Amino acid sequence: MSQLTIRSLAELLQYEGQEMGLTDYFTITQEQINQFAAATLDHQWIHVDAERAKVESPFQAPIAHGYLTLSLLPYFWAQIVTIENLKLQVNYEIEQFRFNQAVTVDSQVRLRAKLLSVKDLRGIAKARIEVTMEIMGQKKPAYNGVITFLYHFL
């Protein structure tokens, strides 16, 4: 459910410096964590061994891989903005990124995004977006940082 539709570089430029929106909450499940562990070959017990995590982990539950939460950025961004008339969208850069707090299994998270800047690179839009993943009921966000997408408009 996108709240905003952008159809061109000129339209994207109009939102430079603005808060773009906030997504609905999304629940991180143990099944997702296990699938991510299988896909990335990262089977560290703090992610996949619920019984051990309850006893030995300072979080008292399994936690999502930081990179799992990061990999949800395109999914969340698409809830905030629909970019139309594209040939291609490319993940370009991640900067000033910090994982602030672990996301425990069954936590609900959402994304807040602000379009920091847009540069016209000969018809390709370079969009820098400040992102913060919030965890329901927590003061500290899961992460915050800046991501950059390249949009090749038609």
Image: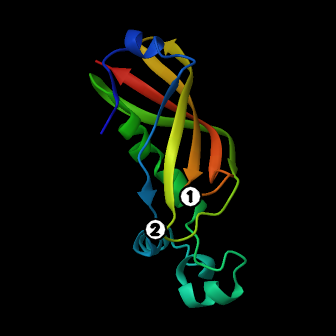
What secondary structure is found at the residue carrying circle 1?
A: helix
Horizontal side, residue 82 vs residue 104: left or right: left
Q: Earlier in the sequence, mark 2 or mark 1?
A: 2
- Kindly identify which residue carries mark 2: 36
* Residue at 51% in and 64% down: 107
Task: Residue 119 in the image: state x and y as whole percent.
Answer: 53, 15
Image check: 5 left or right of 122?
left
- Residue behind mark 1: 67
Q: How many marks?
A: 2
Quarter of the rendering occupied by the N terminus: top left
The x, y position of residue 41, in whole percent, is 51, 73
- In the image, is residue 97 above or below residue 30? above
Mark 2 → mark 1, Cα distance in angstroms? 9 Å
Q: Position of residue 154 (x, y in %)?
A: 28, 18
Whether residue 11 is situated above or below residue 84 in the rendered picture = above
Q: In percent of the image, x 37 and y 23: which residue is there? A: 152
Mark 2 belongs to which amino acid?
Answer: Phe
Q: Are marks 2 and 1 in contact (CB under 8 Å)?
A: yes
Q: Can you say whether 143 is above or below 47 in the image? A: above
Q: Residues within 10 Å of mark 1 (few under 14, many from 20)?
A: few
Helix, strand, or loop for circle 2?
A: helix
